[in-house]
Amino acid sequence: MIQFTLRQLRYFDSLARHGHFGRAAQACAITQPAMSMQIKELEEALGGVLLERNARQVVLTKFGEELAPRVREILRSIDELGDFARASCDQLVGRLRVGMIPTVAPYLLPKVIGNLTRLHPELDVHVRETVTPKLLEELGEGRLDAAIVALPVSEPQLAEVALFKENFLLVRPGEHEGTPEPSAETLREMRLLLLEEGHCFRDQALSFCKMQSSTPREVLDASSLSTLVQMVSAGLGVTLIPEMAVGVETRSASVSLSRFKDPQPSRTIGMVWRKASPLSRQLSQISEVVCLAADALREQQAPRGDVRGRRNKVRHRVA
């Protein structure tokens, strides 16, 4: 009888995903030699070589490539067993794996965690911050319980709950203070600074300006809103940021903030999870906690002047 452990399967899955012993071991919170030993024991138990080892990367053998999706499905089924057990409890307990997009996480996460800790102290919250396509992939594979992203995602297997809506503000160098804000058409002629490819906020800004992502632009793209704002402060161009980021990102930058005329560019932030998840009822409760965090963030930023105070308080729910 073939004997191997669930831990060995998780280590192999991590190696298959990361393609590197060091990164895989770090993700599993073990040492690289310990992981290597466990994989060797798994190979001996299965009677086949799973991967080719070299100094730079890990390459799966044909056997390893065929095994990887089966191991992933086994691990997903095991995680779902735990979800079924947690779903039977009246209280929210155990591990909760939540993903957030980078244009939301730094601003909303502290209040979300604070609310969850206060209202559901038995929860063990794990947060993953990355771009929407990666979050949806990990959600579909069962590596996340829920994700907070910009809606809609239009995935038939996912439930969507709209949490709140927020407008985008224009950020210009400080010397532009008091000058009329440009129209969307005028922005197309300006040096518009954007997040790098893969961020949904980039696509939303381009959509407002009616620009294509492939449009040639002699500008630098950035990996964070913080970098974008600092680039504007240095006089390199202009950018758009969501309202929730204003208080954090502009407090140490010499920039001018202004709103666009109606209809203002905006986005709807929501929470998504698998419709088949046993935790659907509990995740719906979690979405209410996130709404409370968003409300608290609005109240906190409201006294910060006219532009920062007039936040869009529209919030709606979808089934």
Image (tube, rainbow, N blue to C red):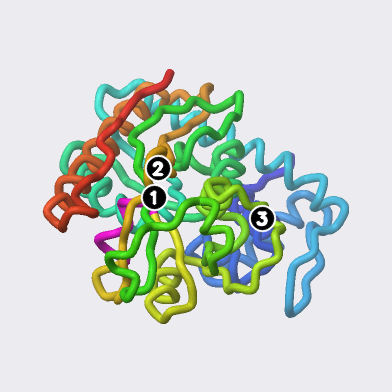
* Residue 240 percent location from the top left of the image: 43, 58
> 3 or 268, which lies in front?
268
Disc 3 residue type?
Answer: Ser
- Residue that protrudes farthest toward the front in the picture: 180
Looking at the rendering, in which quadrant would you find the C terminus? top left
First along the sequence among labels 2 and 3: 3
Question: Residue at horizontal 23%, vertical 54%?
Answer: 307
Residue pointed to by mark 1? 168
Question: Residue at horizontal 33%, vertical 26%?
Answer: 316
Callout 2 touching callout 1 (CB < 8 Å) = yes
Location of residue 267 by image quarter: top left
Residue pointed to by mark 3? 213
First along the sequence among labels 2 and 1: 1
State left or right for residue 296 relative to residue 267.
left
Disc 1 residue type?
Answer: Phe
- Residue that protrudes farthest toward the right in the picture: 62
On whether residue 247 falls in the magenta region, the answer is yes
Tell me if mark 2 has few (under 14), some (14-19) or many (20+) residues whose alpha carbon lies within 10 angstroms of its own: some
Depicted 222 relative to depicted 204: above or below: below
Callout 3 touching callout 1 (CB < 8 Å) = no
Residue pointed to by mark 2? 264
